[in-house]
Amino acid sequence: MSGSVHSGNRRPLASYIKGSVLICILYFLLYAAYVAQQPRALNAGAIANLVNNTVPLALAAAGQAFVVIVKGFDLSLAGVVSVTNVVMAVYPLEGPGGAFASLIICLAIGAVVGAINGWLVAYLRIQSIAATLATMIVCKGVALVILDAPGGSVAEWVSDELTDRLFNLPVSGMILALVVVVWLLVRRTDLGISMYAIGADETAAALSGVNVRWVRFMAFVSAGMLFGLAGYMLSAQTATGSPTAGDPLLMLSFAAVALGGTSLSGGKGGLFASIVGAATLTLLQKLLFSSGVSSFYTGIFQGAVLILAVVFSGLLSHFAIGRKA
């Protein structure tokens, strides 16, 4: 990997750190308001419940961030989550061994869909929105064939153990933390650096020796696996299946990515800030519910917070550029 790609990655990294700090501050402000309203929110059970509610969207947003960084969009999220959810509900595998086998199946489903997306986008050069819309429709059709209406039952071991606590820490939170650690390692590799290079300037990245097609392909495969993991954790939380289980996560995943400061034009952002963005949206839902606000208004408030965060982030970037000039 040439030095130009490494040096070109410094500016997105600095912006990513600033975006992470901004979204973390916003999260803690909302959490302080939530605790002031619900003092019990500080006990271990309430924290575990909040984490369990956050993890499916956080994993979906993390996967979406992979594709957005390389200047793409992945609509297949809704389909992958729906398929993995109904597979978990219709074909439950009990015990720790069954839970592990189910996890492998969910990851494999996501990887296969991601590979198809990557092949269509990277090698056949089909626009990511068109390609992933097609795979989303196919996946949702498969989900309906497996389970035509909400029902089924997820294995008890999965629904009980993965939403429980270990050493007083949420198991789902540990899984999410592991994903973050893996990402922090990946972003330091040639693959991670190349992803940012492609998102910032694909032509320059290619001239620097980056295998653009392969890197973009791997971004979609990685995203698909995280979508599969999101479906797995959603199944553990709901303990049942639905052929439309992934629909609510699709638009919220883009909102979480943008709220975390990841540029939808590619080349800037990361998984951690996107995960915190997802946590912020989930916390906002809980805060509004505890305040007695009708669920009909939740989307309005989420959109307003997203707009304010993006505008504020843009003003900070503009101010920083102005100072450098």
Image: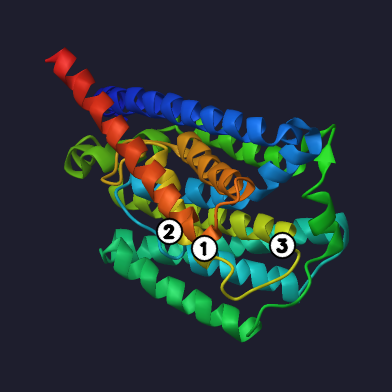
Distance from the alpha carbon under mark 2 to that under mark 3 = 20 Å
Q: Which residue is mark 1?
A: 248
- The residue under label 3 is which amino acid type? Thr
* Numbered badge on residue 13: none
Circles 1, 3 touching at the beta carbon (< 8 Å): no
Where is residue 307 shown, x and y percent of the image? 33, 43
Where residue 102 appears, x then y in whole percent?
73, 62
- Residue 238 is labelled as 3
**Number of numbered callouts drawn:** 3
Question: Which structural element holds mark 1?
Answer: helix
Q: Is residue 43 left or right of residue 234?
A: right
Label pair 2/1, CB-CB below 8 angstroms: yes
Tell me if label 2 and label 3 are in contact, CB under 8 Å: no
**Residue 219 seen anywhere in this rendered image of the structure:** no
- Nearest the viewer among 99 and 319 is 319
List the residue tagged with mark 2: 251
The quarter of the rendered structure image containing the C terminus is top left
The disc labelled 2 sits on which kind of residue? Answer: Met
Residue located 48% across and 62% down the image? 77
Closer to the chain start, of discs 2 and 3, is 3
